[in-house]
Image (cartoon, rainbow, N blue to C red):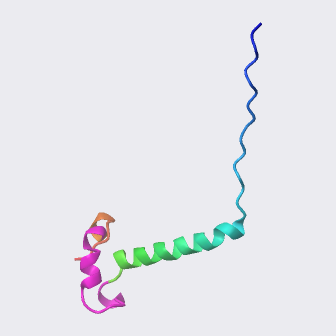
Amino acid sequence: MAQAPPVRSASIPAQIPLRDILPWAVFALVIGMLLIYFVGAEQGATSLFGGNIIHEFTHDGRHLLGFPCH
């Protein structure tokens, strides 16, 4: 007599409360905005730092992401 295959129950993903996710989401947003600023806008009149060090450091990334710089 053949045995029936075991019954598998559907797995339910663990639910993470919003209050646990929110600080990490805000942190990721702030870091992302800083990266976009430094890659896309840190030069010329909007520059927070003097000289070209930030511009030269992010130059290739700037062109890779489509930001014009010269």
Of residues 40 and 31, the one nearer the viewer is 31
Residue 67, relative to residue 38: is it above or below?
above
Give the left or right position of residue 53, taking residue 25 as reference.
left
Quadrant of res 24: bottom right
Residue at (29, 82) in percent of width and height: 54
Residue at (73, 31) in percent of width and height: 8
Magenta segment = 43-61
Of residues 31 and 13, the one nearer the viewer is 13
Give the left or right position of residue 65, taking residue 14 as reference.
left
Q: Position of residue 43 (x, y in %)?
A: 30, 84
Q: Position of residue 11 (x, y in %)?
A: 71, 41
For the C terminus, give its image quadrant: bottom left
Q: Position of residue 32 (x, y in %)?
A: 47, 72
Quadrant of res 25: bottom right
In the image as oriented, which residue stretches furthest toward the bottom? 50
Q: Position of residue 40 (x, y in %)?
A: 35, 75
Residue at (65, 71) in percent of width and height: 22
Residue at (25, 90) in percent of width and height: 51
Residue 45, relative to residue 31: is it above or below?
below
Residue 6, relative to residue 31: is it above or below?
above
On whether residue 4 falls in the magenta region, the answer is no
